[in-house]
Image: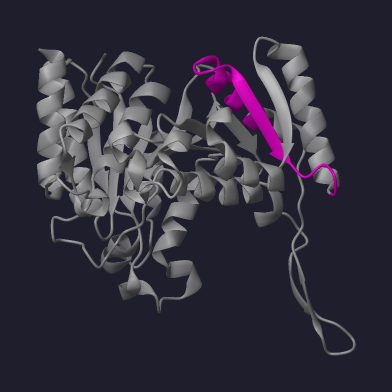
Amino acid sequence: MAANKKLLILAGDGIGPEVMQQVERVLDWYAKRRAIGFDVSQGLVGGCSYDKHGTPLTDATMGEAMGADAVLLGAVGGPKWDSLPFDKKPERGLLRLRKDMELFANLRPAIVFGPLADASSLKRELVDGLNIMIVRELTGGVYFGSPRGIETLPDGTRRGINTQVYTTPEIQRVARVAFDLARLRGRKVCSVEKANVMESGVLWREEVQKLHDADYKDVELSHMYADNCAMQLVRQPKQFDVIVTDNLFGDLLSDCAAMLTGSLGMLPSASLGAADARGRRRALYEPVHGSAPDIAGKGLANPLATILSLAMMLRYSFALGADADLLEKAVANALSAGYRTGDIMTPGATKVSTGGMGDAVLKELDKLAA
């Protein structure tokens, strides 16, 4: 692969720089051992950007993100910046990235590695080998619909208003992402809404079905109400392959699915935009965990979610599926060898630091590439 693919790294706050340092080590390994190179630039986002520039994301960094082939982000936020005005809070930097890059499809895998199956709150037989992909619509729905707000009524009481609204293009573009992903996986999509009580849910169901019948008859499509989906995720989660749903239900269901795995420190994510004429999508990859300021700088953070986010980047932004498989296998082998950071520590395992887990993954990459 040519070395002119542009990658912007935004390590962010808290444990972000520590976990991203391990990702940079993996990138160096790929450059040396697999001849996969990137033009890497570094930028600031979140609290660290506010401290230096007075804003959680500068226009210059936003411009770099728009021109990059992919963005890797660590984490943003922390109590240090809690008292800032709303528009200056670290999280506004991340939200601007998502908005300006038009990242409408959020991919949240819930994967249970065999050695960690006992960390789940569910029985091992229910989650061992679990591999679900939740595709959440990220830029529409009740979080962005209007009218919205809080108003005072004539009798002095107040009313809060949020509007759930979707259009055919918004529904079909995120469903298309889900169907395309399913073709690379188990060829099963479950579309989730509340068509029994919401007109927006009726539209969602109808438009997903229309798209399926027109372009994706080779993929099995089912429909499920969101409340039933939540129940099924804790009853029989391995029945699912790809779940596609709206912004609100995706927010709830992806967190539910995440906890099936036992640790947020293991979960990557991707947020994708629309494909341009060349097939290129703007894309942001980040771990699901937060900035964990209480352990920042202590070498305790688990870097695996960020490393697995890199694997998602290789797969979805650069069509390097075999190299993504290699990295995911190295993570699985490191876990099988008994290496654990504190958040996933189990009796009899070997507790390692952030850098120690990076060492373990690189060691397994060397073995796999030998």
Near-viewer residue (158 or 275): 158
x, y (%) of residue 115?
28, 36
Q: Is residue 236 visible to us here?
A: yes
In the image, is 253 to the left or to the right of 306?
Answer: right
In the image, is 319 to the left or to the right of 227?
Answer: left
Q: Residue at x 38, y 56 (%)?
A: 57
Q: Which residues are magenta?
A: 174-197
Please determine whether, in this image, residue 361 is positioned above or below residue 157: above
Is residue 27 in the magenta section? no
Near-viewer residue (16 or 356): 356
x, y (%) of residue 248?
64, 51
Q: Residue furthest bottom?
A: 156
Q: Quadrant of the N terminus?
A: top left
Please determine whether, in this image, residue 176 is positioned above or below residue 93: above
Q: Is residue 240 visible to us here?
A: no
Q: Residue furthest right?
A: 154
Q: Residue at x 40, y 79 (%)?
A: 83
x, y (%) of residue 348?
14, 45
